Image: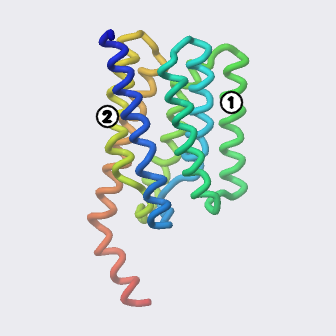
Amino acid sequence: MSAATALALVASAIFLIRLMPQPLRLWRTGVAAGVSPVASANAVTSASAWLAYGVLHGLPVVWAVSVCALLPGLWTVGLLRREFGRAETVATGVVACVFALSAVAGVLGVALALGVLVTAGPQVWRALRQSDLRGIAPATWGVAVADALSWGIYGVVIADHALEGYGAVLLVSACVVLGRVAWTRRTAPATVRPSVAGA
C-alpha cells in the first residue's frame, strides 16, 4: 500500500467520523438552535457531487466515501426538516443547480473546491450571527480540523486542487465555528440568567 493510499483511507475515516456527532446530538437533544439547515442540505448536494466527481476521475476512495456520507447527511436534513422555510429551500435549490451546471460545463472540480463554502459557509454565518448555539455539536467541528488537514494533504500529494481547496476552506470554517461556540458558552451565564429570572 502506497503512502498516498494510506493517507486517503485515513482521511476517509476521519471524514465519516465527522459526520456523526451532529445528527446524534440533534436526535438525542432535539435542540437545533444555531444549526444551519441550509448547510446540512448543501452537504447532501455536495456529497452527491463528490460522488460524481470521484466516478468521473477514477477516484474510488472519493466516490465510496461520498456514498457513505449521504446517509448521515440525509439523517441530519430529516432531523432539521422543521427548520426549512421558503428561503432555505430556494437557497439549497440554487446550490444544487450550480453543481449540475458546473458538471455540464466540465468544471465540476472547480465547483467542488468552492463547494465547501456552501456546505460550511452557512453554518459559519449562522454561528457568527446567533448567540444561542446549543444545537451545534463541537465534536463535529473538532474532527473537521483533522478532516481538513488529512484531505488537504492528500490533495497536495495527488495534485488535486479540489481537495486542496476543500481542506483549506474547511479548516478556516472549523476554527471560526469552534471559536464562536466557545465564546457563546463562556458568555452564556451573563446573558441568559437575567432573562430566565425575569420570566
Image quadrant in which you'd find residue 2: top left
Q: Quadrant of the C terminus?
A: bottom left
Give the total of numbered labels: 2
Residue 177 at x, y = what percent?
A: 38, 48
Between 196 and 163, the one lying in front of the other is 163
Question: On residue 165, which mark appears?
Answer: none
Image quadrant in which you'd find residue 80: bottom right
Between 141 and 196, the one lying in front of the other is 141
**Residue 40 appears left or right of 149:** right
Residue displayed at 33% across by 11% down? 1
Check disc 1: other Cα within 10 Å, few if <14, some if 14-19, many if 20+: some
Q: Which residue is tagged 1?
A: 98
Residue displayed at 52% across by 26% down? 64
Between 114 and 159, the one lying in front of the other is 159
Indicate which label's residue lies in the foreground, 1 or 2.
2
Residue 13 at x, y = what percent?
A: 38, 32
Residue displayed at 29% across by 75% down? 190
**Marks 1 and 2, the one that precedes in the sequence:** 1
Furthest residue to the left? 186
Q: Which residue is tagged 2?
A: 146
Does the residue at mark 1 contact the one at mark 2 (Cβ under 8 Å)? no
Furthest residue to the bottom? 198
Which amino acid, mark 1?
Answer: Val
Q: From the viewer's perspective, is residue 24 above or below residue 143?
A: below
Residue 28 at x, y = what percent?
A: 45, 64
Residue 4 at x, y = what percent?
A: 35, 13
Marks 1 and 2 sit apart, C-alpha to C-alpha, by 28 Å
Which amino acid, mark 2?
Answer: Ala
Residue displayed at 57% across by 58% down? 79
Give SS at disc 1: helix
Check disc 2: other Cα within 10 Å, few if <14, some if 14-19, many if 20+: some
Its colouring scheme is rainbow
